[in-house]
Amino acid sequence: MREVAVVGLGYVGLTMAACLAARGIRTTGVDVDKEKLAMVERRTSPFYEPGLQDMLSESLRSGHLALTADCEEAVGRSELVFVTVGTPSNPDGSINLDQIKAACTNVGSALRKSPRYHLTVIRSTVTPGTTENVVKPLLESGSGKTCGSDFGLCVNPEFVSEGRAVDGTMNPGRIIIGEWDSQAGDILERFYAGFCDGKMPPVLRTTFANAELIKYANNAFLATRVSFINSLANLCERIPGADIELIAKGIGLDPRIGPLFLRAGLGWGGSCFPKDLRALVEFARAKGEGLPVIRSAYDVNEFQPLRAVRMAEHLIGSLRGKRVAVLGVSFKPETDDTREASGLVVIHGLLREGAEVTVYDPRALQNARAVHGEKVRYAQSALECIEGADCCIVVTEWDEFRKLTAEDFVKRMRIPSVVDGRRIYDPNLFKSKARFAAIGLA
Ligand code: UGA
């Protein structure tokens, strides 16, 4: 099996490196952050991702996974180089390519020193044209070699979700390959055929630009679906007898629509949807296209978390001096990631209204503390969080919160009142016992 380097150990890169190693591929993970490398060397994942910790330990123990800050050395001994560095937003929303440029400069120098053919694979999310106009020139000038004849280049976007990254990496649902030439595409397809061991998913081979745009289209489509259902949820709240859950179920039965990504809630967050939609809109604007549908999806999402604050006011009146419990601050369950999480916006809105906020999350309290510091209290359990509270807002649908009963709230809260921001409770069980409001429910 070939040796592989994975450059950039965020959740995509670190999970990928661990998964490749777990399948017996000799893999070197590269990152500039030495503290992070030391942490992983100690067999500790720098973030919470189910299953990753064990996989990392095993891969390091077996010796299939090695770690280094020396990109050139890692690339020199690898036939395949996956670039998985971050592509954050610039202040104007456009994509920031600093990490891509730094990584490709290092890969270019490594290629200069190597007599062999190496294939570089861009797995980071980059706007159309980046691989051809930024990555390829950097690799060619850094190496003094020619793309195609001397080294290979592909774009291979990833579609794994946080919280399910290990399974998504081990069992990809599809493989999109943007290729400079068929030699490069063939090598990558063969690599995946080996990795997937006979269970090869559908493969689409195309140009760099198409592969780059497929990734943005994918995230923009999913985010738009969620904003679509959230808009209708807001309408349902004004129609007696209406319930968005039923509307979603009804339309989801249409095979042309399907049931996924129709869960109404307090909006989407995370490290991908917000920054990718901003980057796509800004990219399109520079090309003279407005993308009004996608812009609206983004705008809807800006206001969605604050609906929870309005609902709390509706239930208990002015929030000034009131104690509000917030359950969940990660942007979704099974992650400790709070980047652009709705929970942070909700907390901000509550503080602005003068509420005293207590937060609990099974995994993300440390990240919440980094944002809100001592402005809020942090509870050690869900029950401690709601103790003596005047209102509780459920922001993230952790299983732990689903298990709470109406009686738990009634027993512990000063005023039993619950805002279900993720539709995890049966309104019939709650409405008779507590003040209750839920997204998308009349
Ligand atoms: C997303 C995509 O789903 C992945 O395919 C993609 O690879 C990844 O971005 C990326 O670009 O790296 P992720 O951000 O981990 O993955 O999370 P999702 O499961 O897509 O959820 C995104 C947000 O939408 C969350 O805040 C979630 O709570 C929200 N959501 C999702 C809803 O509010 N309703 C739904 O029905 C589904």
Image: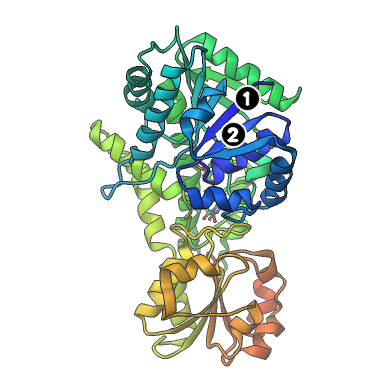
Q: Is mark 1 within 8 Å of ligand 1?
A: no
Q: Residue at x 27, y 50 (%)?
A: 91
Left or right of residue 216: residue 49:
right
Res 193 quadrant in image = top right
Left or right of residue 352: residue 174:
right
Instruction: Tell me, yes or no, if residue 340 can be seen here.
Output: yes
What type is the residue that disc 2 sits on?
A: Thr
Vertical relation: 366 (above or below) 6? below
96, 98: nearer the viewer: 98
Q: Is mark 2 within 8 Å of ligand 1?
A: no
- Where residue 133 appears, x then y in whole percent? 32, 23
Task: Specify the label residue 94 is tagged with.
Answer: none
Vertical relation: 189 (above or below) 61? above
**SS of the residue at dot 2?**
strand
Q: Which residue is mark 1?
A: 3
63, 168: nearer the viewer: 63
What type is the residue that disc 1 sits on?
A: Glu
**SS of the residue at dot 1?**
loop
Q: Which residue is mark 2?
A: 28
Q: CA distance from mark 2 to mark 1?
A: 8 Å
Instruction: Tell me, yes or no, if residue 159 can be seen here.
Output: no
Q: Residue at x 45, y 6 (%)?
A: 149
- Where residue 288 appears, x then y in whole percent? 23, 32
- Where residue 188 appears, x then y in whole percent? 58, 19
User: Coloring scheme of the render?
Assistant: rainbow
Q: Residue at x 48, y 68 (%)?
A: 368
Question: Is there a contact, CB below 8 Å, between mark 2 and mark 1?
Answer: yes
Neighbourhood count class around disc 2 (C-alpha, 10 Å): few under 14, some 14–19, many 20 upward: many
- Where residue 214 appears, x then y in whole percent? 47, 30
> Split into 4 quadrants, where in the image is the N terminus?
top right
